[in-house]
Every structure is written in structure tokens, then in C-alpha cells.
Image (cartoon, rainbow, N blue to C red):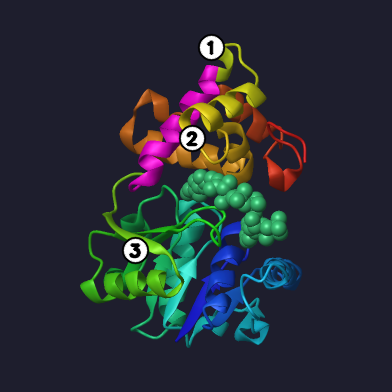
């Protein structure tokens, strides 16, 4: 089996890491050689840590090929897209993947909150398009949502589900409704948390401690938003609000201002916290 991953940012690198760990031949595609090298370094770093900690014996990084050419994905059985969370670029990419890949290649999107059906509609073979929604950090979070779009075939769905299992994840089956299962709940909940910061005049640290120690969350909402990326969360909120028009889904102005100011969380060095 051969798996392609388009985009080696936080999510794509995590997904490619899972593939390498599972011993799958993996092709990672980035737009520049420099970004490709960064993704590869990230994968090597986390896999090396796992070896150092005795969680795995070894890994074979030669399973991973990094390329800037989409044509490098031609021989893949499954391609997982993890590029920027915008409909236009995703639709363009899927139209191109359809031209480049074999007719039986399953084309999966890791979108958080966009419509898989709308992405699939950019191709003339929407039956092979499916959602594979991983959670951040992909190597650590056990869940993957396998999303059935309007025209997804059983064969494509089953292939994606089986790949999720091969990668050691706990897959769940769901349909292409806004936010699927987890983000439908989590995004408005995180937005509520941010609104509470102002309403309850509480600081990020106290809110985080409250949710960790009072609700059993593994990390507080502000820490989690910094991990996910403020920009990514604002995008996902906009996409959900666009579809469902529930006020809780709209990104709170505080988050929009943070995103505009480049306070994106861990990846920019500053969000609710400084890193
Ligand atoms: N990739 C790969 N490996 C990683 C990693 C990453 N991004 N981050 C950490 N690791 C590895 C490291 O090697 C680390 O060990 P080291 O520090 O000794 O090198 C090891 O994992 C363990 O890290 P931690 O000590 O930080 O692990 P914790 O036990 O504290 O758990 C956690 C971390 C799993 C992130 C836990 O805090 C958690 O479950 N948090 C909640 C995360 C969550 O809710 N994610 C979902 C976000 S929503 C989403 O993704 C949807 C999307 O659509 C927006």
C-alpha cells in the first residue's frame, strides 16, 4: 500500500508520521523543498523521541518520500489532503489529483469544518472522495472521523476506514454535516469558553485550570486553542456559522482580533500564552 499526504504542516506531518510508523510507503507533498524538509524533520524528531522513550523500537524513514510535484502521488492507493482550510484551494487540488492519480485512488480530505461534498464536486469522480478528519496532534489523538459525503462509494469509505485502523486510530463513521461530530460540539464550546473570559472576568490561566480540574479536560480551552491555532479555529467557526447560523458558532471578536494580529498560538510563539 502507498499513501500520499498533501501538505506537511502540523496535521499533514502528523498524518505522514502515522503512515511511516505503520510501515506504509508514504509520499509527502509540499509546495517548496524547504517546507518539505521542515515536515520531514518534524516527523524524524517525534519518531526519534518515541524510540528514545522506548515506545517503538525503530522506524524506517526511507518509507517517506518528500516531493514538490503532485505527479509524485500518481501511484498512491489513498491520498490524504491536509492543505490550507479554504474551499477554493481544496477544490482546485482535488480536480488536479483526479487528473494525476489512478482512477481507483481514494481521495481523502482532512478538512475540519468544510463540506466534503463541495470538495468532491470539483471532480468528475466524487464517489472516490471521502473525509478523514484527524485531531490535533494527529499522532497522539486516537480519533479519526471517516466522513461519508453525498456520493461517496462504499468501497472508498471502507478503504478510508481500514486505513484509519491500520494507522492505529479509533475510526468513527459519520456523514457530511457541518463540523461532523466532534467539531459540531467542540467549536461552539470553545467559543463559549472564550466569551466566558470576558463575561466572568476570569484570566486564561484560571479558566484553563477550571476546565482541567473541574471538568476533567486534559488541557484547558485556551491552551487547546493555542495548540489548534487561533486562525484555524476562527476559520472553522466561520465555516460552521456560515452553514448553521447559530450565534455560538460565530468566532468571538477577541479571537478574530488575535488572528488578525498574528497571535496564532504555539505556531507563532504567542496566543493566549507565550511560548
Ligand atoms: N506530534 C507528534 N508527537 C507529539 C506531538 C505532536 N504534535 N506533540 C507531542 N508529541 C509527543 C512528544 O514526543 C511528547 O513527549 P516528549 O515531550 O517527551 O518529547 C509526547 O508526545 C507526549 O507529549 P505530552 O507530554 O505533551 O503529552 P500529554 O500526555 O500531556 O498529552 C495531549 C498531550 C494528547 C495533546 C493531551 O494534552 C490532550 O489530549 N489534549 C487535548 C487535545 C485535543 O483536544 N485535541 C483536539 C483538538 S480539536 C481538533 O484537532 C479538530 C480540528 O479540526 C481543529
Say which of 106 and 214 sits in front: 214
The quadrant of the picture occupied by the C terminus is top right
Quadrant including the N terminus: bottom left
Q: Earlier in the sequence, mark 3 or mark 1?
A: 3
Q: In the rendered image of this protein, does residue 105 appear above or below residue 147? A: below
Image: 229 above or below 2: above
The reply, left or right, for residue 247 in relation to residue 74 is: left
Q: Which sits in the foreground, 90 or 46?
A: 46
In this orientation, does residue 125 appear? no
Image x and y of residue 82, in percent: 52, 62
* Residue labelled 2 has its Cβ within 8 Å of some atom of ligand 1: no
Nearer the viewer's eye, disc 2 or disc 3?
Answer: 2
**Which is more N-terminal, label 2 or label 1?**
1
| Residue 185 horizontal/vertical position (percent) | 37, 37
Query: Most prominent secondary structure in the magenta stretch?
Result: helix
**Taking 91 as reference, is 228 above or below it?**
above
For this view, does 81 lie left or right of residue 122? right
Q: Which mark is residue 216?
A: 2
The residue that appears at 54% across and 52% down in the rendered structure is 136
Residue at the farthest front position: 54
Residues in magenta, as a range:
180-196
Check if residue 191 falls in the magenta segment.
yes
Residue neighbourhood size for the residue with mark 2, other residues' Cα within 10 Å, grouped as few (<14), some (14–19), many (≥20): few
- Please tell me which residue is depicted at 57% across the width and 84% down the height of the picture: 72
| Residue 199, disc | 1
Residue 183: where, in percent of width, then height? 41, 43
The correct choice, above or below, for 5 with respect to 88 in the image is: below
Q: Residues within 10 Å of mark 1 (few under 14, many from 20)?
A: few
Q: Which mark is residue 120?
A: 3
Q: Would you say residue 98 is visible in this rendering? A: yes
Amino acid at each position: 500500500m502507498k499513501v500520499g499526504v498533501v501538505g506537511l504542516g502540523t496535521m499533514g506531518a502528523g498524518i505522514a508520521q502515522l503512515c511511516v510508523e505503520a510501515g506504509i510507503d508514504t509520499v509527502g507533498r509540499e509546495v517548496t523543498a524547504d517546507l518539505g524538509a521542515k515536515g520531514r524533520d518534524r516527523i524524524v524528531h517525534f519518531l526519534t523521541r518515541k524510540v528514545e522513550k522506548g515506545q517503538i523500537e525503530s522506524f524506517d524513514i526511507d518509507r517517506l518520500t518528500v516531493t514538490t510535484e503532485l505527479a509524485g502521488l500518481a501511484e498512491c492507493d489513498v491520498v490524504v489532503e491536509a492543505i490550507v482550510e479554504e474551499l477554493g484551494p481544496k477544490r482546485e487540488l482535488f480536480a488536479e489529483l483526479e487528473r494525476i492519480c489512478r482512477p481507483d485512488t481514494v481521495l481523502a480530505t482532512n478538512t475540519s469544518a468544510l463540506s466534503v461534498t463541495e470538495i468532491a464536486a470539483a471532480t468528475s469522480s466524487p464517489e472516490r472522495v471521502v473525509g478523514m478528519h484527524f485531531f490535533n496532534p494527529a499522532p497522539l489523538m486516537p480519533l479519526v472521523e471517516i466522513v461519508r459525503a453525498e456520493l461517496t462509494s462504499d468501497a472508498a469509505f471502507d478503504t478510508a476506514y481500514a486505513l484509519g485502523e491500520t494507522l492505529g486510530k479509533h475510526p468513527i463513521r459519520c456523514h457530511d454535516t457541518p463540523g461532523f461530530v466532534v467539531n459540531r460540539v467542540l467549536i461552539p464550546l470553545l467559543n463559549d469558553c472564550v466569551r466566558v473570559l470576558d463575561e466572568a472576568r476570569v484570566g486564561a490561566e484560571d479558566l484553563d485550570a477550571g476546565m482541567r480540574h473541574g471538568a476533567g479536560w486534559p488541557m484547558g480551552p485556551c491552551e487547546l486553542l493555542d495548540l489548534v491555532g487561533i486562525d484555524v479555529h476562527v476559520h472553522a467557526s466561520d465555516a460552521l456559522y456560515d452553514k448553521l447560523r447559530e450565534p455560538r458558532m460565530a468566532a468571538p471578536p477577541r479571537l478574530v482580533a488575535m488572528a488578525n494580529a498574528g497571535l496564532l498560538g504555539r505556531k507563532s510563539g504567542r496566543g493566549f500564552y507565550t511560548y
